[in-house]
Image (cartoon, helix red, strand yellow):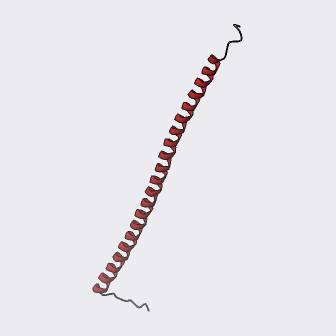
């Protein structure tokens, strides 16, 4: 003999509300976790972008300094060569 248990309509409505509330809480927790993950990713991305921009700027400045130093060295060598008496025309 099987025992059939009937749930009142009110109890069924309360159970359904509880299930919906649980599902909503889970959805909100997932949404919050996704939001935090997106914020962390954006923060890391901004940090990397800043580091790259600084590195590129420093590289450009270093390249400019090296070019300037190379030009000064060449000019000094040329001036030194012009100042020496020519061995070929003595």
Classify 37 as above or below 63. below
Image coords of residue 80 (percent x, y):
63, 21
Pick the quarter of the image with the N terminus. bottom left
Classify 69 as above or below 35. above
Pick the quarter of the image with the C terminus. top right
Which corner quadrant of the image does residue 77 belong to?
A: top right
Q: Please identify the residue farthest to the left as the structure is shown.
A: 10
For image coordinates 48% across by 42% down, the residue present is 57
For image coordinates 54% across by 31% down, the residue present is 68
Q: Please identify the residue farthest to the top as the structure is shown.
A: 89
Image coords of residue 86 (percent x, y):
68, 12
Foreground of the two, 85 or 73: 85
Foreground of the two, 5 or 19: 19
Classify 63 as above or below 40. above
For image coordinates 63% across by 18% down, the residue present is 83
Q: With 38 as the anchor, is 78 left or right in this view?
A: right
Image coords of residue 59 (percent x, y):
53, 40
Which corner quadrant of the image does residue 82 belong to?
A: top right
Image coords of residue 12 (percent x, y):
32, 83
Q: With 80 as the anchor, is 24 left or right in this view?
A: left
| Number of marks present in the image shown | 0
Foreground of the two, 8 or 62: 62
């Amino acid at each position: 003999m099987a025992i059939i248990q009937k749930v009142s309509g009110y109890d069924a409505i309360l159970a359904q509300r509880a299930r919906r509330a649980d599902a909503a809480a889970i959805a909100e927790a997932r949404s919050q976790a996704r939001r935090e993950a997106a914020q962390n990713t954006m923060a890391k991305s901004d940090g990397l972008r800043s580091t790259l921009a600084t590195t590129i700027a420093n590289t450009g400045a270093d390249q400019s300094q090296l070019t300037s130093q190379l030009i000064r060295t060449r000019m000094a060598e040329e001036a030194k060569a012009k100042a020496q008496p020519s061995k070929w025309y003595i």
